Amino acid sequence: MMHRTFLHVATCLPRRERRAYRISCLEATIEPDDIPKTTEPVWILGKKYNAIQDINRIRQDVISKIWLTYRKNFVPIGGGEGLTSDKGWGCMLRCGQMVLAQALVWLHLGRDWLWDPETKDSTYLKILRKFQERRQAPYSIHQIALMGASEGKAVGQWFGPNTVAQVLKKLVKYDEWSRLAIHVALDNTIIINDIRELCLAQSKLDGTNLGWSEWKPLLLIVPLRLGLSEINPIYVNGVQKCFQFKQSLGVIGGKPNVALYFIGCVGKEVIYLDPHNTQRDGLRGEQGDRRANRIGPDLPL
């Protein structure tokens, strides 16, 4: 199996035809029209590119993003007769995974880190393993789906953006290695004191005195509704600006039951990663054998 990325460029305006393009890194069969030939800048999570002069850099940036999709034939969620595929209901869960994975890559490898087919970086592989299709992985589809019960979502039920954000906020607390805090800003409001308490928690230095711990990096998620059945044009400029912030991890959303991970824009078109591609579980062979030691760049998640 190959590490590959589906890159899609789609209009951000209502009722315009969407175009999809595919990048296949290892086969070197990159389509010539994956990025529109335009003088408008290409923005990918805070990085600015020239669509013509920087085309190879754009492709390398995109294929370095961890792409998570529907999977099938994984260990049953909850055991026994539990679901063995998230096809049809797990797209928002996968988008949440991709945002968190990108945050971990930036935090532990740096914003300029790029993937290549020979990558064997131990930190990168450790991040990948956190999203494996097994209950023990802290951000697996199993953990997210089961934690969804605390948000009123049964396993197999589609999540909205706020639900997956709340679930990830809970799961990240159990992952000490990642050193990440997640705050979900409700009602379009960011309360600074809440963030300060979350990222700068007090800890006991001795029996009586309290001290401040090291500041935890923050993943801030702001749930917003930008329209009903389609995006309201008045928000287009704001969405474009979001992709220009160097701190931006993009946007997850879309429409009910169809979630995408938006990572950039070209003018009024957006670039996104699509989780709606069903792959076999990378941890199980044809006979169902466990192959946890095989995960790597050649085994997409």
Image (cartoon, helix red, strand yellow):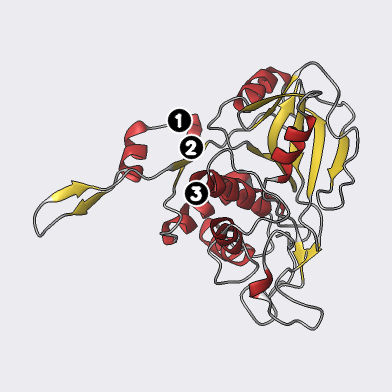
Tag nearer the camera, 3 or 1: 3
Q: Position of residue 81 (x, y in %)?
A: 70, 80
Q: Alpha carbon of mark 3 to alpha carbon of mark 2: how far?
A: 28 Å
Residue type marked 1: Thr
Residue 272 relative to residue 47: left or right = right
Q: Position of residue 59 (x, y in %)?
A: 77, 38
In the rendered structure, the answer to whether residue 213 lies left or right of residue 30 reads left
User: Can I make out residue 31 in this image?
Assistant: yes
In space, the residues marked 2 and 1 are separated at their CA atoms by 6 Å
Residue at 26% in and 48% down? 213
Kindly check if marks 3 and 1 are in contact, taking CB atoms under 8 A apart as contact. no
Quick one: label 3 or label 1, which is nearer the N terminus?
A: 3
The three-letter code of the residue at mark 3 reads His
Residues at marks 3 and 1, CA–CA distance in whole angstroms: 29 Å
Q: Any mark on residue 186, and which?
A: 2
Quadrant of the rendered structure where residue 1 is? bottom right
Q: Is residue 255 visible?
A: no
Q: Nearer the viewer, residue 40 or 142?
A: 40
Residue that carries the numbered disc 1 in the rendered image: 189
> Going from the N terminus, do you reach mark 3 or mark 2 first?
3
How dense is the environment of label 2, judged by Cα within 10 Å: few (below 14), some, or many (20 and up)? few
Q: Is residue 121 left or right of residue 172?
A: right
